[in-house]
C-alpha cells in the first residue's frame, strides 16, 4: 500500500513538472521574437501578471513586421498554463524593408499568426486581408473560442503600392 502511494505521488510530480511545457502558448504560423514585457500586478505565488510585446514577420510578405501586445496572467494557474487569458490584444504592423510577395500565394484573407491563450479551445489570431483596390494589407487581431469568441479586435494596415 505504501509503495503504491509513493508511485502515485512520483507520477503526479512528473505530470505536474511536464504540464507547463505541454500547455505553453504555441506559435503556429509565424516566427516571433519577444520584445519585452511590463508587470501589471504582483503575485505572491508564481509569476506576476504582465503585458507582453512580441514581433512576428508576415510569413508570405517580406518586409512587413507586426507587433502584438497581450496580457499574460501569472500566479499558480498562469504558471501551469491553466489560466483563462483575456481576449484583448493590440496589433501594429509596419513596413520594415522592401515589400516583396508572390501575388499568386496571397489569399484574400489568411491567418498569419495564432497563439493558444488557454488550456482549452481559446486562440488569439491575426488575419491578413488583402485590399487589392488600394494596394494595402490589413491585419486584424481577435480572440477565437470554440463556442463563442470575443468581438474585441484591433486593426492596422500597411500600404505597398505607389502613392
Image (cartoon, rainbow, N blue to C red):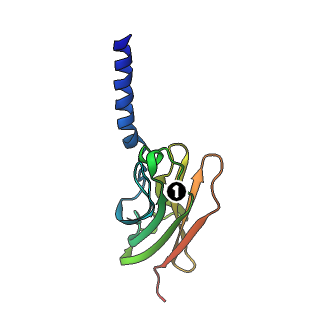
What residue sits right under mark 1 in the picture? 124
* Residue 13: quadrant of the picture: top left
Tell which of 56 and 34 is nearer to you: 34
In the rendering, at what x and y percent does residue 85 appear? Answer: 53, 53
Residue for point 39% across, 35% down = 16
* Residue 63: quadrant of the picture: bottom left
**Label 1 neighbourhood size at 10 Å, few (<14), some (14-19), many (20+)?**
many
- Label 1: state its secondary structure: strand
Tell which of 25 and 155 is nearer to you: 25
Relative to 74, does residue 62 appear above or below in the rendering? Answer: below
How many numbered circles does the render carry? 1
In the rendering, at what x and y percent does residue 93 appear? Answer: 45, 73
- Name the quadrant of the N terminus: top left
Residue furthest to the bottom in view is 163
Relative to 121, does residue 143 appear above or below in the rendering? Answer: below
Residue for point 36% across, 13% down = 2
Residue furthest to the top in view is 1
Relative to 10, does residue 3 appear above or below in the rendering? Answer: above
In the rendering, at what x and y percent does residue 21 appear? Answer: 37, 42
Left or right of 125, for residue 57:
left
Residue furthest to the front in view is 44
Amino acid at each position: 500500500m505504501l509503495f503504491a502511494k509513493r508511485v502515485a505521488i512520483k507520477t503526479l510530480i512528473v505530470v505536474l513538472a511536464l504540464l507547463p511545457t505541454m500547455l505553453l502558448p504555441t506559435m503556429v504560423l509565424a516566427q516571433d521574437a519577444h520584445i519585452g514585457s511590463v508587470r501589471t500586478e504582483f503575485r505572491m505565488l508564481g509569476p506576476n501578471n504582465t503585458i507582453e510585446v512580441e514581433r512576428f514577420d508576415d510569413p508570405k510578405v517580406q518586409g512587413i513586421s507586426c507587433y502584438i501586445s497581450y496580457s499574460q496572467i501569472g500566479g499558480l494557474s498562469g504558471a501551469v498554463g491553466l489560466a483563462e487569458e483575456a481576449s484583448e490584444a493590440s496589433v501594429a504592423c509596419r513596413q520594415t524593408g522592401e515589400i516583396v510577395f508572390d501575388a499568386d500565394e496571397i489569399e484574400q484573407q489568411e491567418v498569419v499568426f495564432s497563439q493558444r491563450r488557454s488550456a482549452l479551445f481559446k486562440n488569439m489570431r491575426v488575419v491578413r486581408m488583402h485590399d487589392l483596390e488600394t494596394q494595402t494589407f490589413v491585419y486584424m487581431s481577435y480572440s477565437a473560442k470554440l463556442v463563442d469568441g470575443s468581438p474585441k479586435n484591433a486593426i492596422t494596415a500597411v500600404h505597398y503600392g505607389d502613392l
